[in-house]
Amino acid sequence: MVTADIFEKLKELQDVLVQKYELEAKVEEAPKQLSAQDELLARLKKEYIAKNTNYESVKEKVLALRFDLDQAVKLREDGEKGMENVETHREYEALGKQIAEATDKENEVRKELQKEEKILAELNETLKMNEEMIKAQENELSESKQSLDQQIQEYNAQLSELKTKEDQITPELPQEIIFKFERIIQRNSEGIVSVKNGVCTGCHMILPAQFANTVREGEEILFCPYCSRILFYEDSEEAAEDYFKIDDSFDDVFDDETDEEGYDDDEEREDDYYGSDDDSDLDDESDDDEDSDDDEDSED
Ligand SMILES: [Zn+2]
């Protein structure tokens, strides 16, 4: 296949791959949309269990207080009944004491009981509210899950359409190029860019003149030594010659441009590039701000 045709196919493939990777990322991220709702539900359930434990212990307290109250009331009433048949002053005094103590106890327990019953009623209300919140949250979550499943189904339908397109394009391209191209697009979302005025439009680095010329000839598939993108030549109205004045001695750097690791790391490649140069100014620049600026550019 002629290089120009390969470039066209690569651009088509790029459109497909960019959409494919976006969709795949969405499918992967999708379940995370529910994590906030899942967490809320788990928190509500945990709170419910804690409140319910508290409710049960207050309920036991209330039952015990009711028993104590019944006892006190019984003691007082027995005392009062006994008063009707009292015969001696001693009996009268003993009964009087029993009634007074029972009455005190009765008042004390009744007060405590009222307090605890109020707490119990409040807890009961809270529990009911909590139950409703849990139910609502469960419903919401199941609705979200349904719509998410639907969304994922849509994504998958789109993905299978893209797969069909991809399968139409890829048999016409060299396997090795496809492999590299896929990896570049996964990283940069743009795998094929033009060279204008000797500059890679992907990372905006000035390419060595000899290399830029080879790109212009369009005889082979070349990768940008800085950002690893595939390069094709595009005419520019400006005088291109001005940009081709960089020292050709950099050429040896690009000999390894097709090796497996070489295009993986922009930074290393840049350092290598500058490292091979005798000009210490360039070295200094690459160590300073310039370095990070270039990195940002290459992610564009
Ligand atoms: Zn580049």
Image: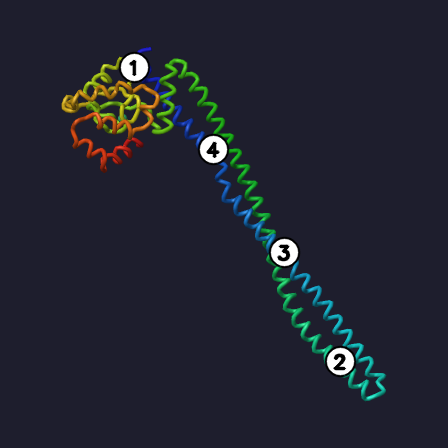
Q: Which mark is residue 99?
A: 2
Q: Residues within 10 Å of mark 2 (few under 14, many from 20)?
A: many
Give the residue type at disc 4.
Answer: Glu
Q: CA distance from mark 2 to mark 3?
A: 38 Å
Q: State the SS at label 2.
A: helix
What is the spatial separation of the Cα atoms under label 4 and label 3, in whole angstroms? 39 Å
Q: As shown in the figure, which amino acid type bears the numbered disc 2?
A: Ile
Q: Residues within 10 Å of mark 1 (few under 14, many from 20)?
A: some
Query: For the residue carrying disc 4, how many other residues have a C-alpha within 10 Å: few (<14), some (14-19), or many (20+)?
Result: few
For discs 1 and 3, the disc positioned in front in the rendered view: 3
Q: Position of residue 15 (x, y in %)?
A: 37, 24
Quadrant in which ligand 1 is drawn: top left
Residue 117, picture quadrant: bottom right
| Quarter assignment of residue 73 | bottom right
Distance CA(mark 4)–CA(mark 2): 76 Å
- Return the residue nearer the eye: 64 or 148: 64
Q: CA distance from mark 1 to mark 2?
A: 111 Å
Give the label on residue 53, or none.
3
Residue for point 49% across, 28% down: 156
Q: Nearer the viewer, mark 1 or mark 2?
A: 2
Left or right, residue 97 beside residue 14? right
**What secondary structure is marked by label 4?**
helix
Q: Nearer the viewer, residue 40 or 158?
A: 40
Judged from the image, the secondary structure of the residue bearing numbered disc 1 is helix
Amino acid carrying mark 3 in the image? Thr
Say few, some or many: other residues with alpha carbon within 10 Å of mark 3 (under 14 / 14 to 19 / 20 or more). Answer: few
Mark 2 or 3, nearer chain start: 3
Mark earlier in primary sequence (1, 4): 1
Residue that mark 4 sits on: 28
Q: Which residue lies under the disc numbered 1?
A: 4
